[in-house]
Amino acid sequence: MTKDSWRLAEMNYGFVKQAKFEVAVLPMGATEPHNLHLPYGTDCFEAQTIGDLACQQATREGASVVLLPTIPFGTETNLREFPLAINLNPSTLLLVIRDIVTSLVQSGIRKVVILNSHGGNDFKPVLRELYGQVDAHVFLYNWYQAIADRTREVLEHADDHAGEMETSFALAYFADFVAKNPDGTLAADDGAKRPTQFEAINQGWVSISRPWHLLTTNSGAGNPHAATAEKGKRLVQTAVERLASFLVELSGADAEDPQFPF
């Protein structure tokens, strides 16, 4: 092991017991279908990729960060009709995260960044509940929201699930798992979404927990066919740079300051 190491899963105790980490990054993924062409582990691969690249960059810029293993399960209650969509209820995820953060505090780490890659994981209530209840400062980075301005510049189609953005990401970083037809085109449908009978829901004025088996044909929500690896690299670069910059700042900040993080 070297001082430039950041992946906890690859570290040994001889290295860890002498290390001092300021920030822990917890990637949160999911196990679920992504149209007909992307793997069930798409959200996990995305979280692992961004977490690894961001921690690598932050470490090289002097930050003291450790990347935890990716949690492969998320909230899938609205995909329950699809086989092997593995669900952890929101209340269960709260307990999982609380226990992980408690373990980190016991190890001397009081700055934790949740790196979320699954839209079904709503972690803002988790931050609210943990605030003041654990001796740690917990931050949330939903990478797909953090680059929303960039996606509008790069993509041709709006992306909801397994569309152009996620397919571009996959083509750039785990292309071997992307299913294609014999002619090289994506083995995917167009990701069309079925409107509800209520215009307020269709317009986004009213929210529901969307039943994905009624909303979509094969779980895809967003047209993936304009995806390219080049688009994926551009988007991931933005996600990595924004997270890495924050990790460097966070690592150097004084968590003992009563005004932290202000």
Image (cartoon, rainbow, N blue to C red):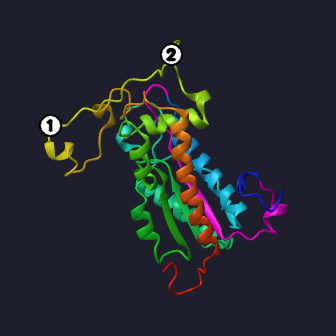
Residue 69 in picture, x, y percent from top left = 64, 52
Residue at 38% from the left image edge and 38% from the top image edge: 79
Q: Residue furthest front?
A: 153
Q: Residues within 10 Å of mark 2 (few under 14, many from 20)?
A: few
Query: Please, what is the three-letter code of the amino acid marked with disc 1?
Result: Gln
Residue 34 colored magenta? yes
Residue at 52% from the left image edge and 68% from the top image edge: 138
Is label 2 in a helix, a strand or a loop?
Answer: loop
Find out whether the residues at labels 2 and 1 contact each other: C-beta distance under 8 Å.
no
Residue 171 in picture, x, y percent from top left = 56, 32
- For residue 223, the mark is none
- For residue 181, the mark is 2
The magenta-colored residue range is: 11-37
- Image quadrant where residue 62 sits: bottom right
Q: Residues within 10 Å of mark 1 (few under 14, many from 20)?
A: few
Q: Residue furthest top?
A: 182
Task: Report the magenta stretch's main SS.
Answer: loop
Is label 1 in a helix, a strand or a loop?
Answer: loop
Residue 190 in picture, x, y percent from top left = 36, 26
The mark closer to the camera, 2 or 1, is 2
- Residue nearest the observer in this picture, 153 or 26: 153
- Residue nearest the observer in this picture, 29 or 174: 174
| 90 relative position to 253: left or right | left
Q: Is residue 67 visible?
A: no
Sequence order check: which comes first, mark 2 or mark 1? 2
Residue 236 in picture, x, y percent from top left = 55, 46
15 versus 251 height, above or below: above
Residue denoted by label 1:
197
